Amino acid sequence: MATTPQFLSSLKYGDSLSLIGISFCTAVICEAISWLLIYRTNSYKSLKSSIDKATKKLETMKTETNQSKITIKKSKTKKIDRVETSLKESSRDLSLFKFKSGAVVALVLFVVFGLLNSLFEGKVVAKLPFRPVRILTKMSHRGLQGDDSTDCAMPFLYLLCSISIRTNLQKFLGFSPPRGAGAGAGLFPMPDPKTN
């Protein structure tokens, strides 16, 4: 069974620190892959700029209609609907574009998770400062011996670190999705209530 590096294993929180470091390195590698496959391409840049333009246009159109407080004409609502539709289509295209590199990133994450699983198998990597609810206990105590529910296994800590580090790294590097891509975006957007 492999162990953590010698200098980290002597520390009190060596396993936790090494897991956080590995999680950070994995996030950097995943973002580098995303930059190579997505963010540096011209099609991504054009999609992002079209989403930004459509979002700004939609915001100005909605503020103009709110300020006038006159009954909105059908032509104005049709224009707003057209801009919303183009924004949804661009957001969907952006999601499909990102989906392609998601497979490569997922492969990297599976490999790293498998390596970490063999490295920290059966080891307590952290102590939780609370007693988690039953469903979280099953995740946080996975593969550990004993009944202490405050013991934390590698998968739970790695999941928490990966989510928080990668999200903040995307924001720091400027790779977070455009403002208008968040609402109703994705491969499976919410149905439009206007069509019913």
Image: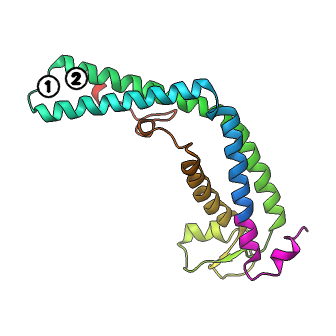
Q: On the image, which quarter does residue 100 sit in?
A: top right
In depth, the one of 136 and 111 nearer the eye is 111
Q: Residues within 10 Å of mark 1 (few under 14, many from 20)?
A: few
Q: Over which residues does the magenta segment extend?
A: 1-20
Q: Which mark is residue 77?
A: 2
Identify which residue is drawn at 70% across, 70% down: 153
**The stretch drawn in magenta includes residue 131:** no
Task: Point out the tag, 2 or 1, that comes first from the N-terminus.
Answer: 1
Residue where numbered disc 1 is placed: 72
Residue 44 visible in image = yes
Marks 2 and 1 in Cβ contact (< 8 Å): yes
In the rendered image, the quadrant that contains the C terminus is top left
Circle 1: residue type: Ile
Q: Secondary structure at mark 2?
A: helix
Query: Can you give x and y, in whole percent of width and height, for residue 189 in the image?
Result: 44, 34
- Left or right? Give the position of 135 relative to 15: left
At x 65%, y 82%, the residue is 148
What number is the disc on residue 104? none
- Of the residues shown, which amino acid type is indicated by label 2? Thr
Judging depth in this view, the residue of 71 and 40 nearest the camera is 40
What is the count of numbered marks?
Answer: 2
Residue 77 locus on image (x, y percent): 22, 23
Residue occupying the far right of the picture: 1
Q: Quadrant of residue 106?
A: top right
Residue at the limit of the structure toward the top, as seen here: 75
**Residue 162 placement (x, y as % from top left):** 64, 57
For the point 67% across and 45% down, which residue is it? 31
Q: Can you say whether 112 is above or below 184 in the image?
A: below
In the depicted structure, whether residue 27 falls above or below residue 58: below
49 up-or-down from 16: above or below:
above
Alpha carbon distance from label 2 to label 1 = 7 Å
Side of 50 relative to 55 (left or right): right
